[in-house]
Amino acid sequence: MTSDTASLLGRQRHAATRLDGRKWVVLPHALQRVGALGLLLACSLCLLLLAVSHRLVTSNALERTPFLAIGRTIQSWSSAELEAWAGANRSLDMEGVIQQQRLVIAEEMSGYRYPAGKNNVSARALSDLVPELGGQPVRSVIVTTWRSGSTFLGDVLHAHPANFYHYEPLLHLDIVQVRGEPLAHGAVGTLRDLLHCNYTNQKEYLDYGPDHTWLFSHNTRLWDACQRRPDLCWRPRFLNAFCRLFPFQSMKVVRLRLRLMEELLADPSLNIRVALLVRDPRGTLQSRLHRDWCPGKPDCSDPKHLCKDLVSDYSAAVRLSKLYPGRFRAMRYEDLSVEPYKKVQELFDLFGLDFHPAVQEFLDTHTKVDVGGVSSTYRNSKSAPFHWRQDLSHDRVHKIQHDCREAMKIWGYLPAMSIRHQREFNPLGNYSLH
C-alpha cells in the first residue's frame, strides 16, 4: 500500500471511528434502562449509524481527494462502491462531471505499462502525462485525406485507454484541402490550440459542432459526458478542463497537407508524433463514389488534385523522416490492412503507446468481417482496400492511372494492364522514402 493510499484510508477510518464513538458514549446509560429487546434495537441502530457515517465520510473524502490519490486507490474499490458513488452523483455540475471522468481515467489506466524511457517517452506514472497535473500528454496525429483508412486507424488509436480524440478538427472548412494561404495559418493554429486543450478562441469550430455532432461523437469519452450534461458540451471552459484530464490525445487530419505539419512537429511544447497514411488513389476514388458530399468538389473528386497531393506528401515525408526519424512515419493503408496487428504495433511504438489488450480486442473485432455501411470500421481488412479492382471499370482505372502515374510510382502502386489483369493482380509494389 502506498503512502497516499494509507493516508486516505487512514483519514476515512479516523473520521468513522470518531463519529461512531459519539454514539457509543451514551450506550452504557441506555442499556441500563432497557431489556433484551432494547439491547437488540440499540445494537441494530448503532450498526446502521456506523454504516451510514462511513459511507458519508468515504464519499466526502473521495470528493476532496486529489486526482492522483484516486488513481492510486482505484484498485482497492469494489465495483459496487464505484457504482454507488457514481449513482449518487448523476445530477452533476461541471466539476462533478470532471471528477467522474478522473475516476474513469484512473480505472482505465489501472495496471498500464508506462514507457519509462522507451521510444523517447519518459513517463513513469499517470501524473507525468496529465496536463492538469503538470504532465505532458502523448499526442498522436494521423495525416491523410478523405476515404483513405483514417476512420479505422483513428478508432484504433481511440481504443487505447484514456485517449481524447480530436476527430477531423477542420470539418468546418468543408470539402477543401489546405495547401497554403489563405487557410493555412488559421488551420495550423486550430490544430495547435486543440492539442493544447485550448478551445477559448475556437468560435468557428464550436459553432459548427452542435449541428454536426459527429465532430464530438467520435470522441466517445467526451460524448458520454455530453450526454450527461448537454449544456456543457460546447462551452470552452468545460472543454479546456475536460481535455486537460487526459494522458493521451489523438487527432486525425484529412484537410491539411503534410508539409504544413512541420510547424507543429517543430513545436517542443507539443512534442507530437505524426503518421502519414496514404492509399492507392484508385481505392480512394472508388470509396469516394459512395459519399454524397464528394461529387462536384474538385479537391475530392478530381484525380489530378488527389495525386498532386500524394506527390507533395511524398516530398514532405522524405524530408520529415530525416528531420524527425523518431516522431514521423509514413504508412500505406493497404499494408496496415493486410497485417493489422504488426503495423499497429509498429505505429504504437512510434507513438510511445502500449499495445494494450483493449487495442488488440478492437483489432480482433474489427478486422475479420464486413458489417455496417460505407463508414463502418468493421471490415475484412485483407480485402477491404482492394474492392476497386471489381467495382471500377477498367476505363475509369485507366484514366486514374494516367492522371496519377507519378504518385503511383513513388508510393509503389502497380498499374492494371487490362480488365482481366485488374481483377486478379496484386497492386502493391515497393516504395522507399530514401
Image: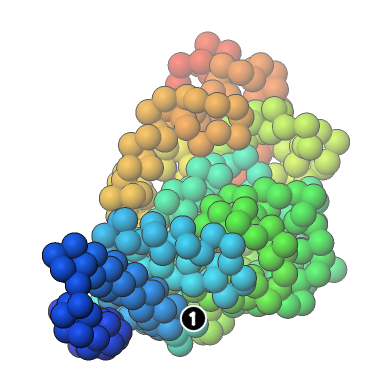
Residue closest to the eye, 89 or 235: 89
Is residue 227 in view?
Answer: yes
Which quarter of the picture shows residue 425? top left
Q: Quadrant of the C terminus?
A: bottom left
Residue 128 percent across, percent down from the top left = 37, 82
Which quarter of the picture shows residue 49? bottom left
Residue closest to the eye, 225 or 342: 225
Residue 192 percent across, percent down from the top left = 64, 75
* Rendered view: 227 above or below 117: above
- Going by the image, does 379 lie left or right of 251? left
Label 1: element kind: helix
Is residue 264 in view?
Answer: no
Residue appearing at x 36%, y 40% in the figure: 363
Residue appearing at x 58%, y 50% in the figure: 218
What type is the residue that disc 1 sits on? Pro
Find disc 1 in the rendering and name its residue. Answer: 131
